[in-house]
Amino acid sequence: MSRTAVVTGASSGIGAATARRLAEAGYRVVLAARRADRIESLAAELRGRGADVVVQPLDVTDRAAVEAFAASLDRVDVLVNNAGGAIGADYVEQAGPDDWRAMYDVNVLGVLNVTQTLLPALRTSGDGTVVVVSSTAGHGAYEGGGGYVAAKHGAHAIAATLRLELCGDPIRVIEIAPGMVRTDEFALNRFGGDESRAAAVYQGVAEPLTADDVADTIAWAVTRPSHVNIDLLVVRPRAQAAQHKVHREG
Ligand code: 8X3
């Protein structure tokens, strides 16, 4: 059986783009996401291009479901922890604990659930790779970042800790930290479907990163020789020199 890559949050954005890239690189790809219809149609597209694809509806915050998923897999070489997202942009003083809890659940406990349960298979592969897609929000704070900044710092901490704990095992731990990426859903989900608030995030920015730009860095890091561990790769658009330093036209 071919080398197998599991991608969470594969229904859209960076996850879907990563599945496309890894399929192109010859991996058998397991598409895991909550929305079955979305991953079914991505699977049909990839199979049309000759890829070997498995569709797995999955909520990474559901521990029992993740355990059953892990038990169903006969081979895992690569895990891309991509599922995640932001809810709101409230200041700490006004933020809702439920939003924070939901962000912690998916961005931190989701990564824990999937990584922990797939580690035995990754170890058995003899050459495993864990990717954590964090964010520049995992490396610096910004006003209104609040719960998302906290959660992504948590995702970064998992990657950094796991790399230390697995030293000596045949498993790499790679963190990819994207800055401003324009996807169909990230900002829209953050602002509860408010299209004008979502559009304002990218207002005047000539070329935010695309999902495929990030997927390209993930595929590049994953396909380096086994002894090369890209610990942390921060990727931003040229127009974003830092979280607060964004060049906007007009
Ligand atoms: C997305 C980057 O700037 O919206 O992960 O926090 S930011």
Image (cartoon, helix red, strand yellow):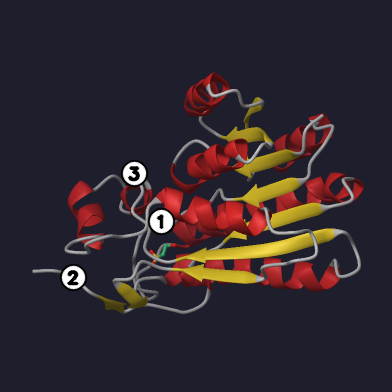
Q: Which residue is mark 2?
A: 248
Q: Within 8 Å of ligand 1, the CB of disc 2?
A: no
Nearer-the-camera pick, 34 or 3:
3
Return the disc, 3 or 2, that comes first in the chain's sequence: 3
Q: Which residue is mark 3?
A: 184
Q: Which residue is mark 1?
A: 87
Name the front one of labels 3 and 2.
2
Nearer-the-camera pick, 71 or 207:
207
Return the disc, 2 or 1, that comes first in the chain's sequence: 1
The answer to whether 174 is drawn above or below residue 119 in the figure is below
* Label placed on residue 61: none
Nearer-the-camera pick, 111 or 95:
111
User: Is disc 3 in contact with disc 1, using a CB cutoff of under 8 Å?
Assistant: no
Q: Amino acid at mark 3?
A: Asp
Return the disc, 3 or 1, that comes first in the chain's sequence: 1
Q: Amino acid at mark 2?
A: Arg
CA gap, disc 3 and disc 2 = 20 Å
Q: Amino acid at mark 1?
A: Ile
Q: Position of residue 87 (x, y in %)?
A: 41, 56
Furthest-left residue in this view: 250
